[in-house]
Image (cartoon, rainbow, N blue to C red):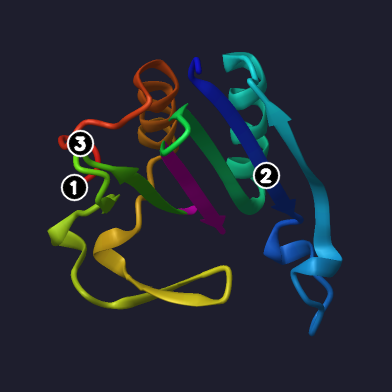
Amino acid sequence: MSEKSYLSWIIYAPKYKRAPGSSLISNIIDNGTATSPGLETIFDKLSVCITNDGVIALRKVRDETSENSLELQVDSGLYLLTLYSEDEKGEQRIRAYHNETLGKERVEILGDMWAACSICRDPAFVRNVFEEFVNTGDVSLDLLT
């Protein structure tokens, strides 16, 4: 089986456009999936997600039992990147952005609380991570630990 890619996304209206007390679900402006999307499609959806709030995930399936998945959650210019992968033994690994200088303060991303050190604030970095994942099916340890 050759490697396949799957892209899924759900994008919300930015918080400042949400009606008070409304749920995220009522503010969906775009959602969908794509099989074997091109780089242009991936970056188009990534740009919309970065501009608004939402979640975008890209999976690379290498064979029947092995896949890697990169997920981005965006909330008000804050980016939570998570890579789910399998090592050569088939064991699950989870890697994420980490910047110790940002401390352990808690930050809200789409209703969940995360340590500030796991939150990226640089959209160019996010694009670089997605581009590396698209090109290699993985992300270097220099980017996600």
Dot 3: what SS? loop
Residue 10 position, x and y percent, is 71, 50
Residue located 76% across and 56% down the image? 13
| Alpha carbon distance from label 3 to label 1 | 17 Å
Q: State the residue position of label 1.
A: 145
| Alpha carbon distance from label 3 to label 2 | 28 Å
Dot 1: what SS? loop
Question: Is 85 on the left or on the right of 13, as rendered?
Answer: left
Question: Is 71 on the left or on the right of 111, as rendered?
Answer: left
Q: Quadrant of residue 117?
A: bottom left
Residue located 69% across and 65% down the image? 15
Q: State the residue position of label 3.
A: 88
Q: What amino acid type should be assigned to the residue bearing mark 3?
A: Glu
Residue 9, numbered label? 2
Magenta-tinted stretch: 67-78
Residue 55 position, x and y percent, is 60, 52
Q: What amino acid type should be assigned to the residue bearing mark 1?
A: Thr
